[in-house]
Image (cartoon, rainbow, N blue to C red):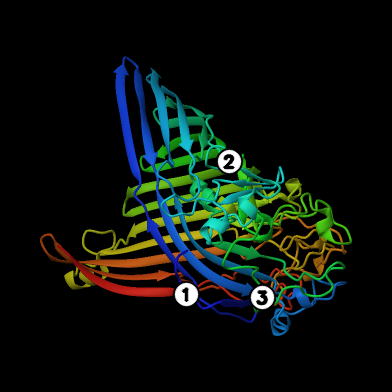
């Protein structure tokens, strides 16, 4: 479709990767209209308004990659600790193949409209109450456009066992090129239906968001604030989600096959070679269920929303000293959870495909569902000394905890670990971005030396050398990043991959960490065949972060309104190493070993003239 010619790629984990990819992101015009009106009525400030946003997008991509894994040359009795990706490559037995040649675009009907009303009521001289409500109506996009000829695609619905065509394509006998239906007379295959409205993702029309807040001043030096609100994430991710099936059947722009040649009792020998792993590159197959894996979504997917609340107290302790304590909480619903689906619901021996809910449907690379959730609670305290007597200082500390169901961040960008997609409650645990302790100290200090300062020699030359110096700094001390322990192979024999966590067989909490063994590696073991591991998500954490950045500045008066500045800055001043996460794959020979660290100290010196 894109007319590109690329060198095919070969991926051998732990050894080398080759090939090339091509992409072109063409940001489209986004249009935004907004209007608001305010009216003051006695003690009420009334505000209402609305907005309308239209979004566009176009992206061209191309790649052709064949990947190899150790699984195809592993021992069936110990798949998690045997095999070699290089050996699989040498005998030409691939694990996966991806061919991507498509234009991803969305129509101009994409966007949202929103309306709001707010009443800010000054109930008394020391109490203000805010009440409001907002309504958003998103218009989710269809995939592709008629102009780009990329809208005749479909989506696998793994809840109903059907393939939903967004728009009907003509028979291949008429066009001779995709998108087309490669059956006699263009008849729809079994389990294939056509969307009645030309799109797959359904709009959500119930995005009602109440808001409430108060600000109370019990005395001139104290302020209390509290608030609650519901917030919908209307469009974040929806343009990506709607575009995921672009290139799928009856188009031919995206073909992907994973878990090829997986050794089992029903497949004793390989069936696909790396020489020509794709079934066709000219016309689509007769059915969408033979075109490989892909990225699909629940057609009833809903946008996530969050209930958020906070309570804070602010107190002036002295003329230039302010103390604050805040509690912040939230709970999020309908959070996206992706990952593979249509795998066997329970572990067990034998051919796992016989236990698939819909054996005729391929296992997707990801099937996005709005079934997740998360919650966050934090207590923060801060002390701020406003600039006086040459010093400004801020100290803040936050103790927090974030929990979710297997998926952290938009489309799991922060981390994903779901062992059984039919029971994600087993994967409830610390979010991948959970940082329990976070201390930050920042300061600006005018050193008390020189003419007119606390310490002055009375000598112009001496004071000019030692005067007008300023010391700035930021200290960042926080918990390290948590990480998962994983085990290669489909040990549970569900037809899935990349999901297994180990069994916990010892104490991993207390251990004298070293680079050679960051955690007690003997506390983890490969699960027994046909079982899920009993280890939870994100059990371990990297080294705590301790970064000190400092700068020293000197101003040199030259003339009225003109002065020079010398500056020396250092990042990670003390140059103490901060190690990255160790190897957390149980079957690796370097399991538990730290092999890298964050960047070391950097310094820079500069001079400038201000006028």
Q: Is residue 452 left or right of residue 496?
A: left
Q: Residues within 10 Å of mark 2 (few under 14, many from 20)?
A: some
Kindly identify the residue that appears in the image at 88 percent across and 62 percent down.
350
Nearer to us in this view, 472 or 590: 590
Disc ID at residue 515 = 3
Rendered position, 306 above or below 39: below
Percent of width and height locating residue 293:
65, 60
Q: Quadrant of the C terminus?
A: bottom left
> Between disc 2 and disc 3, whose residue precedes?
2
Q: Which residue is mark 1?
A: 5
Q: Are marks 2 and 3 in contact (CB under 8 Å)?
A: no
- Label 2 or label 3, whichever lies nearer to me, is 2
- Label 3 or label 1, whichever lies nearer to me, is 1
Q: Which residue is mark 2?
A: 195
Q: Residues within 10 Å of mark 1 (few under 14, many from 20)?
A: few
Give the alpha-carbon distance from disc 2 to disc 3, as whole Å: 56 Å
């Amino acid at each position: 479709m894109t007319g590109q010619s690329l060198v095919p790629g070969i991926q051998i984990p732990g050894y080398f990767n080759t090939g090339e990819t091509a992409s072109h992101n063409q940001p489209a015009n986004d249009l935004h209209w907004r209007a608001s009106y305010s009216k003051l009525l006695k003690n009420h400030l009334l505000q209402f308004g609305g907005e309308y946003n239209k979004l566009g997008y176009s992206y061209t991509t191309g790649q052709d990659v064949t990947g190899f894994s150790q699984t195809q040359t592993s021992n069936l009795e110990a798949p998690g600790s045997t095999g070699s990706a290089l050996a699989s490559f040498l005998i030409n037995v691939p694990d996966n193949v991806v061919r991507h040649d498509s234009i991803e675009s969305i129509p101009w009907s994409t966007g949202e409209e929103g309306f709001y009303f707010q009443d800010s009521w000054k109930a008394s001289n020391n109490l203000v109450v805010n009440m409001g409500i907002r309504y958003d109506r998103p218009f989710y996009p269809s995939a592709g456009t008629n102009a780009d000829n990329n809208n005749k695609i479909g989506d696998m619905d793994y809840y109903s066992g059907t393939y939903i065509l967004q728009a009907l394509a003509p028979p291949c006998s008429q066009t001779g090129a995709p998108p087309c239906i490669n059956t006699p007379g263009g008849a729809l295959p079994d389990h294939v239906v056509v969307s009645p409205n030309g799109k797959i993702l359904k709009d959500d029309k119930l995005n009602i968001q109440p808001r409430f807040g108060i600000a109370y001043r019990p005395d001139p030096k104290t302020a209390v604030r509290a608030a609650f609100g519901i917030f919908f994430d209307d469009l974040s991710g929806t343009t990506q989600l709607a575009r995921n099936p672009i290139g799928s059947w009856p188009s031919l722009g995206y073909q992907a096959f994973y878990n090829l040649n997986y050794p089992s009792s029903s497949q004793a020998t390989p069936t696909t070679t790396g020489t020509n792993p794709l079934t066709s590159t000219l016309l689509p197959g007769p059915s969408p269920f033979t075109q490989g894996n892909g990225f699909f979504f629940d057609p009833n997917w809903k946008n996530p929303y969050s209930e958020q609340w906070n309570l804070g107290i602010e107190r002036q302790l002295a003329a230039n000293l302010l103390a604050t304590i805040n509690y912040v909480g939230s709970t999020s619903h309908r959070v996206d959870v992706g990952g593979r689906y249509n795998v066997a619901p329970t572990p067990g021996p034998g051919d796992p495909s016989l236990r698939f809910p819909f054996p005729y449907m391929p296992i997707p690379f990801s099937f996005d569902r709005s079934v997740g959730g998360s919650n966050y609670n934090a207590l923060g305290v801060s002390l701020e000394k406003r600039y006086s007597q040459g010093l400004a200082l801020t100290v803040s500390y936050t103790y927090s905890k974030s929990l979710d169901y297997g998926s952290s961040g938009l489309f799991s960008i922060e981390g994903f670990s779901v062992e059984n997609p039919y029971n994600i409650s087993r994967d409830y645990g610390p979010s991948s971005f959970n940082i329990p302790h976070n201390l930050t100290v920042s300061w600006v200090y005018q050193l008390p030396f020189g003419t007119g300062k606390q310490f002055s020699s009375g000598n112009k030359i001496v004071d000019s050398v030692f005067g007008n110096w300023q010391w700035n700094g930021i200290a960042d001390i926080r918990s390290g990043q948590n990480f998962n322990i994983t085990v290669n192979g489909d040990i549970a024999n569900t037809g899935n991959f990349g999901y297994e966590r180990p069994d916990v067989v010892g104490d991993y909490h207390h251990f004298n960490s070293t680079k050679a063994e960051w955690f007690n590696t003997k506390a983890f073991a490969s699960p027994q065949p046909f079982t899920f591991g009993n280890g939870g998500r994100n059990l371990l954490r990297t080294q705590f972060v301790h970064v000190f950045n400092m700068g020293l500045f000197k101003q040199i008066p030259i003339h009225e309104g003109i002065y020079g500045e010398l500056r020396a800055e250092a990042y990670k001043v003390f140059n103490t190493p901060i190690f990255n996460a160790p190897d957390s794959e149980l079957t690796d020979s370097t399991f538990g070993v730290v092999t890298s660290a964050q960047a070391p100290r950097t310094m820079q010196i500069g001079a400038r003239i201000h006028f």
